[in-house]
Each structure stands twice: as structure tokens, then as C-alpha cells.
Amino acid sequence: MGRRIIVLVHDDGGGDAAALAAGLAQAELHLLPWPDPPAPPDPAWGFDAALVCGAVPDAIAALRAAAPKTPVVAISDNPADGEAADAWLRPPASALQVAARIRALTRLAAMEDVAARRAGAARRAGATVPLNDEPALRPAVLFVGPATPHFMAVRAALASAGAEVVAAFSSYSAFDYLHERAFDAVVLNAIDKRDFAFTISSAMRRNSRLYHTPVLLLAPPGGRGDSDEAFARGVSDLLPAGAPQDEIRDRVLTLAAERQRRRAARNVLESCRDARILDAASGLYAARFAAAHLQDLLVAARRSGASPVSLILMRLKGPEPAVSAAALAAARRQFAAMLRHLLRAEDLPALIDDSLFAAILPHTGAAGAGCVADRIRAIADCTAFEGDDPLKPFRLRISTAAVEAAGEEVAEALIERALRALEGARQAAG
């Protein structure tokens, strides 16, 4: 489960928020009532996102003025409300869907924020990071399922907005397309083949490369009986086949735009990997840059009041009996490569010294950092590295410590506290 998210909520009296409260709380979303909309909310309340229910354009406008980067999800009968919000859902909305949309939007906002901060820190350190000012590409949408009249309606709606629509009439051809190129959204025809659509959606959510690709289900008109199961299987939205074409178009393209934004933020983060701020041997960020970026994140977190920052330190030791220095150095390089792939794009892996590694986790609390540290340690513990004798591989010994920044703590103090925790973990392990 991800970190607890604080959601500012306003309901104009329609009751949607009250009906969703239990399900959202179960998904670890804490609802914070907005006491007096459309009076501007105070960002010091520390909310991560907002949920507005009903015809509340004034409330959304006030929120945008007070906290312009806060993701907003609107639930209403009026599609026009979706123009001011980041996501628009028709009532009755599923708590699973609302929670998934809020989590996706808050993580996207966090990723974009970290990408901008890391790019700024990299430029200040002398790295060359290109500006992320390229126009968005033409959205690409994959439609999967029978070529029914409803498909033609969806295709026409998307084509009118300049989107590219590719059709796949079987699951085999669908996954061939998905592995050949990147799509911004996938629409599954579930009108007569619900299980077929659920199978594809579930398979995409098990694939790390396809995990963030939005999946929309073209469902029978008025049919929402399977909505909870659909959202539990990773579906992003339901498209009633009888809905107006402009509504279908906007809902697909809204999710496609989010996918493009995520890809753009990830590209910025990758472009920050300049040789001038990296350790050449490991490919990880150098200690000096890591400390500077950590300090910037800590300052930003204190200003926002709602974005925790955590740090993981990892100490590697060779096996007993010892192996050669060359074999140990090769194992550490392999561990560094593993570490990069075990972290999110917005996390920062760094090398502090030959045997001390770090991971900076923005927008992550102590519980989440502890889970990441446990996963890293578990994978490292069961990984065999090549020794001096190829027939005798060895395992590294790893100690980890995860700490969350507290109060006015600066980067140096947080690193020192993590080092003390790491030493305590090492002594406890013997």
C-alpha cells in the first residue's frame, strides 16, 4: 500500500463524498473537509489532492488560485466540470476508481515536481539538461476487441481530435502491438467479452513496462455492475457505449495526456544523468550531488508541509572467506545496477563511498522507505555474484537503514542520523 494521502473534500450536498468515505479510508486516503468553499483553502492544511462532488466550478477555481499544482478530481453529471479538473467522473463513482485516480494524479504531480527540482540541481552543478519544452506528440490509442459499430464510434471520436487509433482484434495481436511501440491509452471492448477485457487489463498491470498505461473499458450502456471488479483489475475508466462521442473522446484523451506527462517527466529525470554528477564506475549519482539534491527536497517538503522525504543507506560487505578485490568491485557494480532498477524513476540512487550506497525517496514516509529497504535487502541477500572461481559464486552481506526527515533537519543531519541507524542495524545483526 502507498503512503497515506490527504484529500481535501467538498460536496455540494449530492452525497457522493459521504458514500465514498469508507472505501477511500480503506484505501488509505484521509478525507479533510473543506469547511467554507468557495473561500480559498489554506495550503498549510497539508492536503495532497482535492475531491469535489457536484456542480462546484467556483470551488475548483478557488482551489486553483490557492494551490495551482494540487490534483483535482471532480464527480458530477456535467462533463464541463472536467475542463477545470484533472479528472472527471460520472456518479455513482466507485471508491476504487476514485482512489486509483487520486493516487495516480498525486504521484504524477510529485514526479513532475521532483523532475523539475533535479533538473535545476543538475544545471547548478554544471550538468547539461535540455529544457522539457517539446510539444506533446499525437496521442496513440490501441483499441482491442471486435470491430463493432461502437468501436467505429470511438474511433471517429478520437480521430476528430487528431489521435492515432490502432485496432487489434485479438489478445495476441494486442500484446504484439504493446511490445512493439508505446501507446498512451488502451481501450478494451468489453460489451460482449467482459472476461476477455479483464484478462488483458490484469496482464498489463503485471507488466512493469505497461503498468502505467491507462486502460479504459467500453462497456454496455448503463452497465456498471462490474465496476468494482474492473477497477480492482487495474481498469482506469469505464466508457458507456451509448455516451456522447465528445465525452468518450475527452475521457480517453485526458488519460492519454497523463501518460504523456509521465513519460515526459521520466525523460527529464533520465536526462539528468550527466557524467559530471555521476560516479563513473557505478553509474550512480555522486555523493556531493546527492546531498545537494536532498537538501533541495527537504526545503521543498518543509514549505509544502505534506511531502515527506526519506533516505535509505546500504552498507555492503564481502563474503567470508574473502574474495579478490576485483571480484568484490565487480559485485558492487552489479549491485549498483540492480539498485537503479529497484527504485522509482523519481528516486535517486547514489554512491557515498566504495561500500556505502544511498537511495533518496521523495514524497515517501518512513513506512514506505522501510518496505523499499526490505525489498532491496531481500533481493541482494539471494543474489549470487561471480567469484574468482566461476563455479563458486558468493553473496554480499548487506545492512540497511531507512529514516524519514524530521522537523528542520538539513541533509547533513539526516545522513548522519541514517549512518547511526545503519551502524545500529549492523551491530544488531552481529
Image (tube, rainbow, N blue to C red):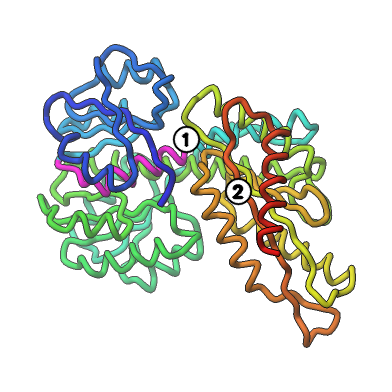
Q: Quadrant of residue 329?
A: bottom right
Q: Residues within 10 Å of mark 2 (few under 14, many from 20)?
A: many
Q: Where is the C terminus found, in terms of image quarters?
A: bottom right
Residue at disc 2, secondary structure? strand
Was residue 96 drawn as part of the magenta stretch in this picture? Answer: yes
Tags 2 and 1 in contact by the CB under 8 Å rule?
no
Was residue 411 drawn as part of the magenta stretch in this picture? Answer: no
On the image, the x and y values in percent for residue 344 come to 56, 50
In front: label 2 or label 1: 2
Q: Quadrant of residue 385?
A: bottom right
Q: Which mark is residue 109?
A: 1
State how far apart marks 2 and 1 are (Cα).
Answer: 24 Å
Q: Is residue 125 above or below residue 177?
A: above
Q: Closer to the camera, 291 or 341?
A: 291
Q: Is residue 177 left or right of residue 80?
A: right
User: Mark 2 belongs to which amino acid?
Assistant: Ala
Q: Which mark is residue 402?
A: 2
Q: Is residue 249 above or below residue 202?
A: above
Q: Residue furthest right?
A: 325
Chain part drawn in magenta: 92-108
Q: Is residue 220 left or right of residue 418?
A: left
User: Mark 1 belongs to which amino acid?
Assistant: Ala
Q: Closer to the camera, 245 or 128?
A: 128
Residue found at x 64% / y 29%: 409
